[in-house]
Structure formats: C-alpha cells, structure tokens
C-alpha cells in the first residue's frame, strides 16, 4: 500500500481524469491519453511550472498534509480507571472539577493559562479573530515570522524597522481583551533579526514575549515568496531580503522590459546559531525587556533536535515549541508538507528519549510544547500522555484558525440577516446562535460588541475541547495535568508500541494483577 496521495490535490486545484484508476507508486492515471487537457499536477505543471509547488490560495485558505502516516494518535486508546483518584478528593470527582490551568515560565516571570494550549505562529488569514480569540480564552498565541514584508505600511530606516502599524494592531487585538491569562509572542526569523524586528517590538510596541525560529520550523527550507513585478522585487530587496534573480542587475532589468525575465523569488535566510551567539542574543533580548523567550523548531533529524534542546537548556529560554509533520505548514511546498520530516507521534517518541537523557544529566528543561495536527481533546490528551512528564502544553494551529474563520463567516451572515438554515433552529441573533455570548458578556460587559466574531468562534471551540479534555481526564481519574502519565494511553498496534516504547495492552498491569489475585 502507499501512504502518499495521488497526482492531484485540492491544495493546488488539481484532479485526476480517472480518480479510481491510478498507479499507487507514481500517482499517475493508469491510462494517460494523448488528448487529456492535463488537470492533474503533472498536466498543470506543464502549463504553470513551479507555481504548482505551492498552495494556490495562500492568503485566503489554510492547508494541511494529506499523507496517511503509518502511526498516528488514532493508534492509541485512553486507559481509563474505576478505582482511585489522583489530584482530587473522592467526593469531588465530577469532571467539571478537573483543573486544566497551568502556570509556566521561569525566574523572569510566569504566564498563567486557563488550559495547556497555545496557538502557534500565524501572521495572516483572519489574525484578528486568532489573536483576540486566544486572549478571551486565556491562552498563548504567536505572531508569525516575516512581519515586515507582510505590512505594506512598514517603514524602514537604515535597514531597520522604524514603524510597523500592523504589528501594533496585532498587539492590541490580543491585549485589549486580555484578562491576566496568556500572552502574545512575536516570532522572528533570520531576516526579521537582521531588520531589528524584535528590538523594535520590545522597545516601541511593548512586547515582553518573543520567539526565535530555528530552521524554517515544520519545513527545512527558507520561506519563499514569488512575484512578477520588478517594482515589488526592488522594494523587497531594499528592505533587506534576498531576491533571485537580482532585480538590481541591469541585465535582469533589460530582460524584464522585453518580457523575458523569469519570476522573482524572495528567499529567506536560514539561521546558523551556535551556543555562544544564541546565548548572547538571549541576553540582549532580556536586557531589552523580554521576560519570555521561546524557540520554535520542527521535525528535523534526532541529532538536530538534541542540539536544539541543549541550546535551550544552556541559554535558559523559557519555552520550546516542537512542530511535527502532519499538521499544516503555511506557505510550504505541497510535496514537502506531505513527505518531509517526522510525523508528530514519531517526533514525540524521539523527544521523550532525549528528555530522559537530559534529566539523567540534571540539565534544565524549558516548557515543552508539542504541535503538529492536534485538533480535538483526544489528540491533546494522548499528546500530553505520550510526552509525559516533559511535554506540558499542546499547540493547536489549523483547528483554532478553522474556528476563527467559521466564527467570522457565520457572524457576518447573521449581521446581514442571512442565517444558515441549519442554525436557524437556535434563533436569528448573534446572542442566540453563538452559545458563548452570556459568559463573554459577564466578563466583558458592553465591550463584547467589539470582540471579533472569529474570537467568539475560538472561545466556543476552546470551551468544547476543554470540556472534552476534562471528561477524558476524569475517565482516568486524573484531576490535574501533573498526574497525566504515559501509561494513560495504550498502543493498539505493534507498530505503535514499537515506535513509542509504550507497554502493549496484554502486558500492561501484569505485576499489579498478580498482587491483586494473591490477596
């Protein structure tokens, strides 16, 4: 069997002529005819070239991998209990009493969260709902890399960011609704650092939480933007980005005038951090006023993950987010998104062994956040259990953005008086249809009118998965997060047991059973 998809995907609007008849190895239609108009990836590549590498609607849609990995979280079940209680008295074991709150940080400060979730980096696509949704839910959110090129009103002086109006809007979209829980991080890649983005954000905007990106996170190449305008290429180059081909080259400009110029690519630089240089940068950010510093990395080879973990331990960063394959990776080549890196379960199994070795050496660990395809409470419970006691939080990216997009879409329709038929059973108004409005009104009063519909969508979604997580934890009689353990999940397949090192179901509790029977 093949784990990969065939030679077509909705991500770039391609399809097979004979979707039921294709070669599993190549993904190509079994019979490729001479008169086909080429709706598949190969056919469209014959017309549009490298455009087919990337999703077609990156500014209005989000995308995910389509590969069916051999082991994922569905290969585990949750291991319930009907005796005992961990973290609560026996007379208070109803699931609403499960405590999901967490406090994380270091000597430089602590961040309180209402649940062990963060929203990983996003810099576009309904960010108002995404960031304000994190605020009203009491969680962490991260603004994604490459902000200077995202904001058309960015002002640069001497190669450094002097004003970034969109970043200020993003900051206020979170802190205007913050009630003492969570924080808004700003992520920076190499180009952002060269432009002084974090320095500007801390000193001029008020950011206290920042994130440094190692590699290109869930993808191993540089971030890439493609455009055909010479004017835009020159503008990006003047800001400090690397542009290929060089738009300042007279020969390239002549080709452009003759309509013979290839498209321009903005290609991000990759970091080459060493312990000393990274440590110095961490200290610089601390002196500027950063209370919380995070690292974002992805599913690179195990040795690189170990180096990154050691870098975090030796430089004293507060958080590290580790992104597994299988979720979404933003503006990534489609086949890279499917075929590159370690899927989340595999990556977390590798991480667990690294953390064990570091603990044996008494090395400090940052707060570890696992992300990569998490969307529901069962995934979250299994992710926390598989990485226990080291993984403390779970990143929810595409799912949270889905909630934000649907919240905005439905809210806009209600305002226009066009309530979808399947929702009209609840009423016709915002307060009737969105179930979280009463709680938000109690907390925000009249200010609720300003909360974006996308944020309300996220608030309701987080309330759902938080309630679901409480139920699953109560099923295991675990009433706070510290009591979740690896044996709270059981592998259902030999592959799942082998990859993770978890005890197989027929061997679990065997010694305890012997003791019970002897009694």
Image (cartoon, helix red, strand yellow):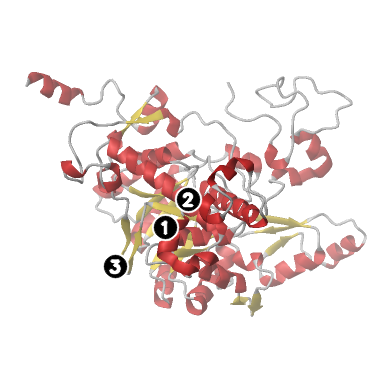
Q: CA distance from mark 1 to mark 2?
A: 9 Å
Give the mark nearer the N terminus: 2 vs 3.
Answer: 3
- On the rendered structure, is 264 left or right of 181? right
Corner quadrant of residue 293: bottom left
Q: Is residue 295 visible?
A: no
Marks 1/2 in contact by CB < 8 Å: the verdict is: no
> Which residue is labeled 3 in the image?
107
Rendering quarter of residue 424: top right
Q: Secondary structure at mark 2?
A: loop
What label does residue 439 carry, if any?
Answer: 1
165 w.r.t. 73: above or below: below
Q: Nearer the viewer, residue 435 or 150?
A: 435
- Whether residue 454 sits left or right of residue 462 in the image: it is right
The residue indicated by pointer 2 is 435
Gap between marks 3 and 1 measured at Cα? 34 Å
Q: Nearer the viewer, residue 8 or 280?
A: 8
Which quadrant would the N terminus be assigned to in this image? top right
Q: Residue at point 52% right, 31% down? A: 69
For the residue pair 380 and 216, the one nearer the viewer reads as 380
Q: Where is residue 53 drawn, in percent x and y?
A: 70, 44
Comparing marks 2 and 3, which lies closer to the viewer? Answer: 2
């Amino acid at each position: 069997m093949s784990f990969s998809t065939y030679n077509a995907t909705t991500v770039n609007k391609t399809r097979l002529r004979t979707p039921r008849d294709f070669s599993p190895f190549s993904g190509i239609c079994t019979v490729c005819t001479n008169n086909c108009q080429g709706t598949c990836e190969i056919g469209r590549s014959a017309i549009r070239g490298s455009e087919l590498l990337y999703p077609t609607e990156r500014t209005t849609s989000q995308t995910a991998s389509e590969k069916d990995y051999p082991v994922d979280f569905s290969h585990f079940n949750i291991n319930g209990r009907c005796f005992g209680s961990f973290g609560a008295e026996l007379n208070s074991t109803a699931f609403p009493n499960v405590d999901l709150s967490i406090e994380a940080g270091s000597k430089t400060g602590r961040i309180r969260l209402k649940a062990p979730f963060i929203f990983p980096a996003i810099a576009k696509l309904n960010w108002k709902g995404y960031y304000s949704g994190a605020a009203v839910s009491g969680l962490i959110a991260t603004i994604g890399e490459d902000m200077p090129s995202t904001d058309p009103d960015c002002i640069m002086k001497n190669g450094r960011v002097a004003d970034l109006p969109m970043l200020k809007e993003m900051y206020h979209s979170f802190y205007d609704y913050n009630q003492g829980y969570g924080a808004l991080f700003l992520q920076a890649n190499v180009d952002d650092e060269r432009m002084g983005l974090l320095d500007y954000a801390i000193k001029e905007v008020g950011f206290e939480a920042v994130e440094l990106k190692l590699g290109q996170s869930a993808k191993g190449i540089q971030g890439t933007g493609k455009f055909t305008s010479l004017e835009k290429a020159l503008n990006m180059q003047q800001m400090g980005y690397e542009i290929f081909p060089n738009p300042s080259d007279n020969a390239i400009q002549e080709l452009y005038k003759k309509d013979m110029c290839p498209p321009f690519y903005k290609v991000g630089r990759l970091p080459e951090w060493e312990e000393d240089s990274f440590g110095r940068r961490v200290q610089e950010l601390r002196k500027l006023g950063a209370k919380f510093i995070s690292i974002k990395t992805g599913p690179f080879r195990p040795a690189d993950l170990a180096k990154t973990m050691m870098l975090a331990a030796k430089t004293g960063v507060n958080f590290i987010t580790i992104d597994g394959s299988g979720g979404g990776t933003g503006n990534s080549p489609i086949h890279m998104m499917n075929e590159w890196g370690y899927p989340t379960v595999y990556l977390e199994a590798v991480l667990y062994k690294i953390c064990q070795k570091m603990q044996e050496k008494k090395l400090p660990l940052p707060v570890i956040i696992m992300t990569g395809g998490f969307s529901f409470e069962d995934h979250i419970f299994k992710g926390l259990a598989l990485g226990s006691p080291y993984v403390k939080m779970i990143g929810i990216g595409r799912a949270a953005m889905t909630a934000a997009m649907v919240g905005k879409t439905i809210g806009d329709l209600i305002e226009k008086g066009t309530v979808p038929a399947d929702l009209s059973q609840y009423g016709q108004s915002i307060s009737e249809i969105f179930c979280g409005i009463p709680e938000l009104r109690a907390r925000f009063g009249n200010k609720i009118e300003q909360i974006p519909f996308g944020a309300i969508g996220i608030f309701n979604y987080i309330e759902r998965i938080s309630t679901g997580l409480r139920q699953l934890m109560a099923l295991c009689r675990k009433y706070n997060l510290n009591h979740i353990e690896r044996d709270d999940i059981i592998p259902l397949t030999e592959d799942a047991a082998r990859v993770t090192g978890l005890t197989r179901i027929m061997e679990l509790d065997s010694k305890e059973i012997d003791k019970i029977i002897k009694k």
